[in-house]
Amino acid sequence: MSIEFSKSLTTTTTPIPGVVLYQLPVHGDNRGWFKENWQREKMMALGLPDFLPVQNNISFNAKAGTTRGIHAEPWDKFISVASGRIFGAWVDLREGDSFGAVFTTVMDPSHAIFIPRGVGNAFQTLEDSTAYTYLVNDHWSADAQDQYTFLNLADEKAAIDWPIPLDQAELSLKDESHPRLSKVKPMMPKKILVLGADGQLGKALREAYHDNTSVEFATRSDFDLGAQASYTRRKWKNYSTVINAAAFTAVDAAETAEGRKTAWAINVTAVARLAAVCAHHGITLVHVSSDYVFDGSQEWHAEDEELTPLGVYGQTKAAGEAVVAVIPRHYIVRTSWVIGEGKNFVRTMASLARQGIAPTVVNDQIGRLSFAQDIAAGILHLLQTGADFGVYNLTNTGEPQSWADIAADIYELSGASRDHVTGVSTQVYFEGKPAAPRPMNSVLDLSRIKATGFIPAHSQQRLTEYLAK
């Protein structure tokens, strides 16, 4: 079989999700041929994930009929043929709906194929002196072999039509002894790590991921953001995503000497350590930020607005955003006025309403509530749909309100009179009290998150449901 020279670089999808076949341009003449086996820029432009390869391996096979596989390793592979010709067979051995899906094709040096982690790889040489090459994104080690998943080459359900019958082919004893598909334990996906799992958003993420066994939840005792050991003792290659829902959020305390130190340590220094880990291992980092990165002077705040924090808390959140933004795979989810399971404004007002207390509430700070369940749902949406990386504003929808307006709604929904709530200015409310400066307008533009197909629930609907509990 002769190689067709000067074809265009093109891609072909396959029945196995994530497995993509590439037609490689091969340039040749009477002396031989040359090809770009791996060209990151061109291939990423065609949709190949930037899988950060670290090791290149070659399997040389002396005779036609040599058959190897079916092996699924815990890393991604970019496979091509250096010389000769092979019949390739791939079986999806990942947990999920596509488990057991099969794809086969004949490959020569003008082909390459991307095989995601957990998809079984096998090939049979069709010519003598065939070299099969692997570009992988993790270093091989003996310790990793217990994470492999294997399938028997002769599995009846996969029903691979080997050009050279297996009883006439060269096989290893190990490959002959691998289990049938019914006995294969699917390879679990890479893990998601949720930090701050005991906070309001962390609890909502627990609920959103309650049936996903590949998600780990870490409280401060499990993962101390201030301890170097937290970043060095984990096998980060086993993680695909980190969701950072942990932060120092004591806005007023951040203005004190000790609070300022803690806010910078947790919201900036720890985030920088986390960002370095994620960048090094190709992990997606989801980082939760705040409306406090703005001074509140605009009618609404878009994702690309220049950051203008007023107080220490806002400054640390802005600095954290700047750190996360340099990671290739990141989502910065900017939110405001978070309400979830735990101490919050809605619970406080509902308690005062039940006690018959008439509160004084600020009426010149404007924004929208952000219920933790919707923030969690938005994060899952971004990850599951593979939305473009970057910054996304995420609050509930509805007309912007002041804190006093919301308090009046809470009183009414709790069976008390709206008139029990008295509105005052921020200046009057905090007069004589140590307090951080606050943005007067916290309304976040939701156009970008809506464009991905995620429409947050109306804040009044969520408030009614929350109080009904």
Image (spheres, helix red, strand yellow):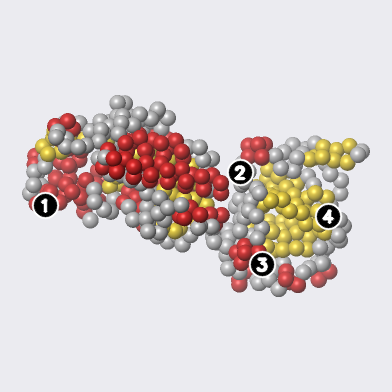
Instruction: Name the element at disc 1.
Output: helix
- Mark 4 residue type: Thr
Q: Quadrant of the C terminus?
A: bottom left
Label 3: element kind: loop
**Position of residue 237 in the picture relative to residue 106 (left or right):** left
Percent x, y of residue 412: 14, 45
Q: Which residue is mark 2?
A: 50
Is the C-beta separation of discs 1 and 4 under 8 Å?
no
For label 1, count other residues whose C-alpha is less than 10 Å away and answer few (under 14), some (14-19) or many (20+).
Answer: few
Residue 439 is situated, as x and y percent measured from the top left of the image, at 28, 32
In the rendered structure, which disc, 2 or 4, sits on the residue that comes first in sequence?
A: 2
Q: Is residue 262 left or right of residue 408?
A: right
- Residue that appears at 86% across and 49% down: 1
Residue under pointer 4:
130
Nearer the viewer's eye, disc 1 or disc 2? 2
Q: Are marks 2 and 4 in contact (CB under 8 Å)?
A: no
Q: Can residue 355 be seen?
A: yes
Q: What type is the residue that disc 2 sits on?
A: Asp
- Badge 3 is on which residue? 151
Q: CA distance from mark 3 to mark 4?
A: 23 Å
- Which amino acid is tagged 1? Arg
Residue under pointer 1: 354
Amino acid marked by disc 3: Leu
